Image (spheres, rainbow, N blue to C red):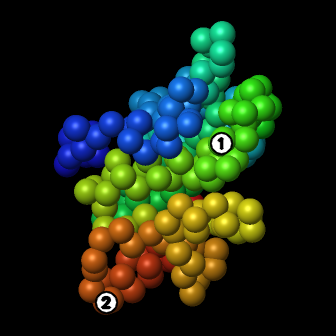
Amino acid sequence: MSGSATNAAFDPREILPRELRDFLTITEIDHADFIVDALFRAKFGEGPPEEAHHLACLYRAPDGASFLAGYSHMRPFGDVYLSGGSCTSGDTIRRMQPHERAAVEASGGVWFWLLKYAFRKYADDCDAFFGHCGNPRALQVALAAGFSKTEHEPVIVNWHKPLHESIRRALLAKVVALGEF
């Protein structure tokens, strides 16, 4: 079953702390290029992936206008999900009112909440989440959100359900063999 089917009652507002809910929301979008293309190209030099699942964090300004605050991609890869292509918009963060920006920073940041959303939304769809994280600041955020380091740096993992150690080793080996994603 897909995340939307298994988590039909999932309310994304449950993920965000109360102090962020008036001006941030996180949602899955079908086609990232419509909303995410400019940010993704600025960060990675190419367009966003075509495969599902695209997560967008949107900021609602005081005048009601919406702006992309962050993006993360969760790619199904058999029995695991691969987290990648994550980026935040400095322009949108700077657009926030000082108290909003402070609340976002104090609560872990935009990417932290995108990861928390993904871990909740897709928990029933995979046996683990893997990421590829070489940036020290990003790693700090990923670890705070629920990822753990592996012996195969820069591969990180979120073991969100109990699995036999041999299954864990096999899943990790599969992802390591894939290389950078």
Q: Residues within 10 Å of mark 2 (few under 14, many from 20)?
A: few
Numbered label tally: 2
Q: Is residue 119 above or below residue 91?
A: below
Of the numbered discs 1 and 2, the one sitting upstream in the chain is 1
Secondary structure of the residue carrying tag 2 is helix
Q: Which amino acid type is shown beneath numbered disc 2?
A: Ser
Q: Which one is in front, 117 or 47?
A: 117
> Mark 1 = which residue?
104
Which corner quadrant of the image does residue 119 belong to? bottom left
Snapshot quadrant of residue 98: top right
Q: Can residue 105 be seen here? A: yes
SS class, disc 1: helix
Q: Nearer the viewer, mark 1 or mark 2?
A: 1
The residue located at (53%, 48%) in the rendering is 113
Residue at 23%, 38% (x, y): give it: 9
Residue at 70 percent across and 68 percent down: it is: 134
Whole-angstrom CA distance, mark 1 to mark 2, is 39 Å
| Relative image position of residue 168 (x, y in whole percent) | 36, 82
Looking at the picture, how far across and down is residue 166, in whole percent? 31, 89
| Residue 51 appears in the picture as rendered | no
Decide: few, some or many residues near mark 1? Use Cα within 10 Å; few <14, some 14-19, many ≥20. Answer: many
The image quadrant where one finds the C terminus is bottom right
Side (left or right) of 20 relative to 95:
left
Front residue of this view, candidates 97 and 60: 97
Residue found 47% across the figure and 59% down from its top: 82
Q: Above or below — where is 57 with respect to 95?
A: below
Amino acid type assigned to the residue bearing label 1 in the image: Val
Q: Which residue is mark 2?
A: 166
Query: Where in the figure is residue 154, as x and y percent of width and height?
Result: 64, 74
